[in-house]
Image: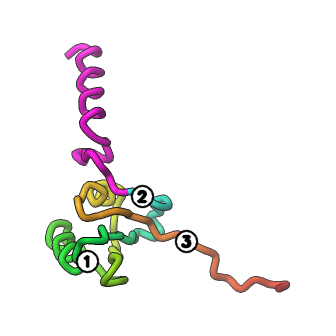
Amino acid sequence: MRVTEIVAGLALSLAAGAVLAEGAVCEHPAKVENRYNPAAPRCYVIVSAAKDVKAVAARVQQKYHLQPALMSLSHGFVLSGVTEDLVAQLRCEPDVEVVGYDAITDTAPSHGR
């Protein structure tokens, strides 16, 4: 295969949707917030307003073999033990609007306040 054929194929796949990870391509990926940190391999998933959070969480559990923790019946859930590739796949789920990584914050007491 020549370089021009590879470039043309890549351009077609990019035009068809966002390339998120190996094998994960979709037209309208969910927004992602924060950055992946292996020290905190969790993410929250915000579900589309018109969708049933419990049903989406159950489907995600069955498909990806992770146990969601419901954070809100009207908004979404939290997943532990995620990878960047898994989050890329979650972003392509039709009922997911936002996937965000946990942010690690300094919880040490501040001195001098």
Q: Amino acid at mark 1?
A: Val
Q: Is residue 30 above or below residue 14?
A: below
Q: Amino acid at mark 3?
A: Ile
Question: What's the mark number on residue 104?
Answer: 3
Quadrant (top left/top right/bottom left/bottom right) for the N terminus: top left
**Residue 88 on the magenta span:** no
Based on the displayed image, in which of its 4 quarters is residue 50 positioned? Answer: bottom left
Q: Callout 2: helix, strand or loop?
A: strand
Question: What's the mark number on residue 74?
Answer: none
Q: Residues within 10 Å of mark 2 (few under 14, many from 20)?
A: some
Query: Contact (CB < 8 A) between labels 2 and 1?
Result: no
Of marks 3 and 2, the one in the foreground: 2
The residue that appears at 28% across and 32% down in the rendered structure is 15
Quadrant (top left/top right/bottom left/bottom right) for the C terminus: bottom right
The residue segment tinted magenta is 1-30
Residue 81 position, x and y percent, is 33, 71
Q: What residue sits right under mark 1 in the picture?
A: 53
For marks 3 and 1, give the CA distance.
Answer: 26 Å
Q: Is residue 1 above or below residue 36?
A: above
Q: Is residue 109 above or below residue 30?
A: below
For marks 2 and 1, give the CA distance.
Answer: 18 Å
Residue 109 position, x and y percent, is 71, 86
Q: Is residue 2 above or below residue 82?
A: above
